[in-house]
Image: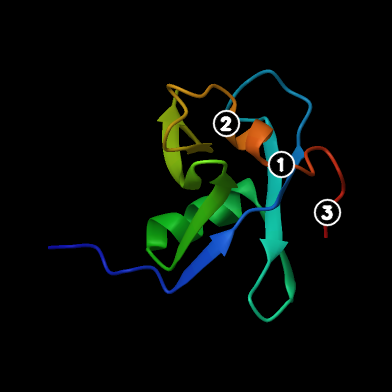
Amino acid sequence: MAKPRPYRRRAVTFVNRAYSKDPRERVATIGGVQADRLHWKLSQDAAIKLIEAGSDEFYVVASDGAVKLVVLTHGGEKYLQTEREKTHPDDLLTLCPMLGRSGV
């Protein structure tokens, strides 16, 4: 059975970084601006739950187009990365121009 199409596609325009070298703990929150100009901000755990529920899809805009965020698991812990992370290390952290700022 095919997964339902996500209700919301959200562009991630900022990442609040946690101070950790562990890839599962490096992203504290993600956020952006909706089409109606309302700001949104979610913890990594909340974004993971929305992705897994199939209700939301998150992406970052790269020079070559949109790059989707995916949920990965390491040692039983879930975390966010871009779908091209293997070829573009730290993709999520480097694609977001407001890295480290407080965001919303």
Instruction: Mark 2 vs mark 1: give the one in front.
Output: 2
How far apart marks 3 and 1 lie (CA) works out to 12 Å
Let me know if residue 9 appears in the view. yes
Q: Is residue 85 left or right of residue 95?
A: left
Farthest residue, direction left: 1
Amino acid residing under circle 2: Asp
Q: Residues within 10 Å of mark 2 (few under 14, many from 20)?
A: some
Q: Quick check: 81 above or below 86?
A: below
Amino acid residing under circle 3: Gly
Residue 65 picture location, percent across and down: 49, 47
Q: Residues within 10 Å of mark 3 (few under 14, many from 20)?
A: some
Q: Which quadrant: the N terminus?
A: bottom left
Let me know if residue 41 appears in the view. no
Residue 53 picture location, percent across and down: 39, 62
Q: Nearer the viewer, residue 43 or 82?
A: 82
Q: Is residue 65 left or right of residue 35?
A: left
Circle 3 sits in a helix, a strand or a loop, which is it?
loop
**What residue is at 79 percent from the left and 26 percent from the top?**
19
**What residue is at 49 percent from the left and 41 percent from the top?**
64
Amino acid residing under circle 1: Ala
Farthest residue, direction top: 21
Q: Which residue is mark 3?
A: 103
Q: Quick check: 21 above or below 73?
A: above
**What residue is at 73 percent from the left and 22 percent from the top?**
20
Q: Nearer the viewer, residue 78 or 29?
A: 29
How far apart marks 2 and 1 lie (CA) works out to 15 Å
Circle 1 sits in a helix, a strand or a loop, which is it?
strand
Residue 92 picture location, percent across and down: 60, 36
